[in-house]
């Protein structure tokens, strides 16, 4: 158990819909990262928050947005869903917002768009 | 932006043999290089990491080497066991980029008994 909690574990939804994925980082960790892993694909960086503020942005679609709340939990919002958005979405956390901090991954949220 | 290339994409070895996975990175400012192991449907788990001020690091059967000049790093697994079968990802992180990891494409390692 990494200490990073993600909900829901599995989600099936229809095209055009909107979903929210939730992440609670490890106790004390200030950074939250979101990654997308499609079938047979690697881990694509989406976005990072550090202590409530956006720290880095990857190839995140405009239909996707995220935020980190004062209690440090984070949500990833996916809207106007397409079949290609079906993937495993990982949240990860680290103590700081700098290179060299160990990054721990949650168990992921499986999203299936039908 | 940062790019990490990983080879090979698949690797099959006999139990007891060694396995080597290689990665190259593009951003010379990268200074942290972790390796993650991911079993099917599971989360990536850190197995070893190395920082740019170190050339080699070893942890039991696992070792990582770093060549900053050539911008490549490698994972070495000795005396492989069937439970080493998984997908391995290398990653790189740039101090100036907030700590995010950019991952290689992954190597599916299969260890045959």
Image (cartoon, coloured by chain):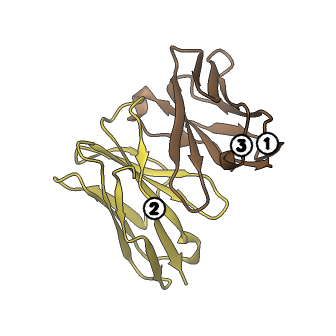
Chain colours: A yellow, B brown
- Identify the secondary structure beneath mark 3: loop
Rounded to the nearest angstrom, the CA distance separating label 1 from label 2 is 31 Å
Q: Residue at x 27, y 42 (%)?
A: A29
Q: Which residue is mark 2?
A: A108
- Residues packed near mark 1 inside 10 Å, few (<14), some (14 to 19) or many (20 plus): some
Residue of label 1: B15
Q: Residues within 10 Å of mark 3 (few under 14, many from 20)?
A: some
Of A98 and B79, the residue lying toward us: B79
The quadrant in which residue B36 appears is top right
- What is the chain identity of the residue bearing mark 1? B
Whether pointer 3 and pointer 1 mark residues with C-beta atoms closer than 8 Å, the reply is yes
Relative to B98, is A16 on the left or the right? Answer: right
- Measured as percent of width and height from the top left, residue A109 is found at 44, 66
Q: Chain of mark 3?
A: B
Task: Give the residue number, with chain letter if any, for mark 3.
Answer: B81
**Above or below B56: residue A109:** below
Residue at (76%, 49%) from the top-left corner?
A: B110
Structural crowding at the residue carrying mark 2, measured as other residues with C-alpha within 10 Å and reported as few (<14), some (14–19) or many (≥20): many
Dots 2 and 3 on the same chain: no
């Amino acid at each position: 158990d990494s200490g990073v909690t993600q909900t829901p574990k599995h989600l099936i939804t229809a095209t055009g819909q909107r979903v929210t994925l939730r992440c609670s980082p490890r106790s004390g960790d200030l950074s939250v990262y979101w990654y997308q892993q499609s079938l047979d694909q690697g881990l694509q960086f989406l976005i990072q928050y550090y202590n409530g503020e956006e720290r880095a942005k990857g190839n995140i679609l405009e239909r996707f947005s995220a935020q980190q709340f004062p209690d440090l939990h984070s949500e990833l919002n996916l809207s106007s869903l397409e079949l290609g958005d079906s993937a495993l979405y990982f949240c990860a956390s680290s103590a700081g917002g700098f290179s060299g901090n160990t990054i721990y991954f949650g168990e992921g949220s499986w999203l299936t768009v039908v | 932006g940062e790019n990490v290339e990983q080879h090979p994409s698949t690797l099959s070895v006999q139990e007891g043999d060694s396995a080597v996975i290689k990665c190259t990175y593009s951003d010379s400012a990268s200074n942290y290089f972790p390796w993650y192991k991911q079993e099917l449907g599971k989360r990536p788990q850190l197995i070893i990491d190395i920082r740019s001020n170190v050339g080699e690091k070893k942890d039991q059967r696992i070792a990582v080497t770093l060549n900053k000049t050539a911008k490549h790093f490698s994972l070495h697994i000795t005396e492989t066991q069937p439970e080493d079968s998984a997908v391995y990802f290398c990653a790189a992180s740039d101090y100036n980029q907030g700590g995010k990891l950019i991952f290689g494409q992954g190597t599916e390692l299969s260890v045959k008994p």
